[in-house]
Amino acid sequence: MAAAPSQQQASASPLPPQKPPLAARPPQAQHRGPAQAQAAAPCIFCKIASGQSKSYRVYEDASFVAILDAFPVTEGHILLIPKMHYKTFFDMDDPELAAAFATTRKLAAVLRKALGADSFNIATAPSAIDHFHIHLMPRYDYDLMGPLADLDNKREMSADRMAGIQKKILAFLGGGGAAPDAAGSAKAKV
């Protein structure tokens, strides 16, 4: 039986030490970065996650919200946003990051059924918004974009069309009749 590694051996690991579980973290750890800037103006994704800003919300659980991208690349383009503010995925614990991608996979299965998506592109591309998020872009045989969705090919959709897409997704999540929250967003859970 091998002996346990010494403190010196353990610290030589190329992997950073794990952060304490979410429940054990102090409240200020929930929003990372310069506290003064965050107190003055929280990021738009923090406002969306807390229901303070309007969005086409299609999913919510204790850790994440998913919204339709305001300028989608494809029909049903979703952003999965952690409720806790993380600047990049490097700021997340392994279990949190794994949960984000597991949720992304669940949402992809819903989009396949609700919208008839043929495949998906998933990206964590740099953004003007300094809050980690995952792009889930349904792909369709007719979208003619090649193997990768072009993130510069964003377009505006009417409010009626966005609401129609939201309604289709919510119907497959069991939230077809979900009432909008205070910010005008319907909520559903997978």
Image (spheres, rainbow, N blue to C red):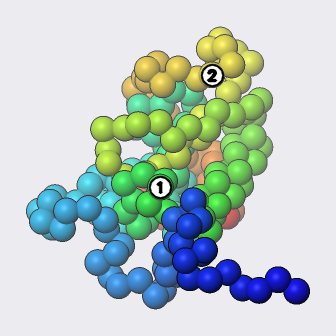
Pinpoint residue 85: horizontal percent, then vertical percent.
37, 62
Q: Which of the 4 image quadrants contains residue 51? A: bottom left
Residue 45 in sight here: yes
Residue 90: which numbered mark, if any?
1
Pinpoint residue 78: horizontal percent, then vertical percent.
54, 43
Instruction: Say what secondary structure mark 2 lies in.
Output: loop
Disc 1 residue crowd, few under 14, some 14–19, many 20+, Cα 10 Å: few
Q: Is residue 139 above or below residue 179?
A: above
Q: Sequence-wise, which precedes: disc 1 or disc 2?
A: 1
Residue 51 in sight here: no
Q: What residue type is labelled 2?
A: Leu
Instruction: Say what secondary structure mark 1 lies in.
Output: helix
Q: Which amino acid does label 1 sit on?
A: Phe
Q: Which one is closest to the eye, mark 1 or mark 2?
A: 1
Find the distance from the CA under tag 1 to the CA under tag 2: 24 Å
99 sits to left or right of 71: right
Residue 165: which numbered mark, if any?
none
CB within 8 Å, label 1 to label 2: no
Would you name the residue on which mark 2 appears?
Answer: 148
Q: In this view, does 88 lie above or below 17?
A: above
Report the residue at 41% width, 37% height from top: 126
**Which quadrant: the C terminus?**
bottom right
Q: Is residue 165 above or below residue 35?
A: above
85 sits to left or right of 28: right
Pinpoint residue 48: horizontal percent, then vertical percent.
35, 57
Residue lying farthest to the right in this orientation: 1
Pinpoint residue 110: horizontal percent, then vertical percent.
72, 49
